Image: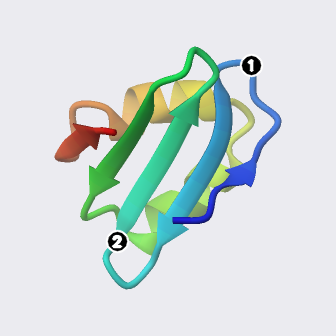
Amino acid sequence: MNRTPVSSTSIAEIGYDEQSQTLEVQFRRGGIYQYFDVTPGVYEQLMAAPSMGQFVAEQVKGRYRYARL
């Protein structure tokens, strides 16, 4: 999956595959996680969020199945 660099203190890159509804987040500390069944609307909200790290912590973690790569 292609990821886009983002301006965030905790996240380095974000990728999204709309067909599989998979969100991929590469954290600055090195971990890469895939979150499954993430709707396009949630992805759009993440990309527009003033704090992407806070959005992931509050709206993604614990709400979606995930795998660490």
Of callouts 1 and 2, the N-terminal one: 1
Q: Residues within 10 Å of mark 2 (few under 14, many from 20)?
A: some
Q: Is residue 30 left or right of residue 9?
A: left
The residue at which mark 2 appears reads as 21
Question: What is the three-letter code of the residue carrying label 1?
Answer: Thr
Residue type at mark 2 is Gln
Q: Residue 18, image x and y in percent?
A: 44, 79
Give the image location of residue 62, x and y in percent.
22, 31
Which residue is painted at 43% across and 25% down in the image?
Answer: 57
Q: How many marks?
A: 2
The residue that appears at 36% across and 64% down in the rendered structure is 22
Q: Position of residue 11 (x, y in %)?
A: 64, 30
Horizontal placement of 20 versus 52: left or right?
left
Q: Against 55, is 40 above or below?
A: below
**Relative depth, front residue between 66 and 50:** 66
Q: Residue furthest right?
A: 7
Q: For mark 1, what is the residue?
A: 9
**Is the residue 9 above or below the residue 11 in the image?**
above
Which of 53/45 is in front?
A: 53
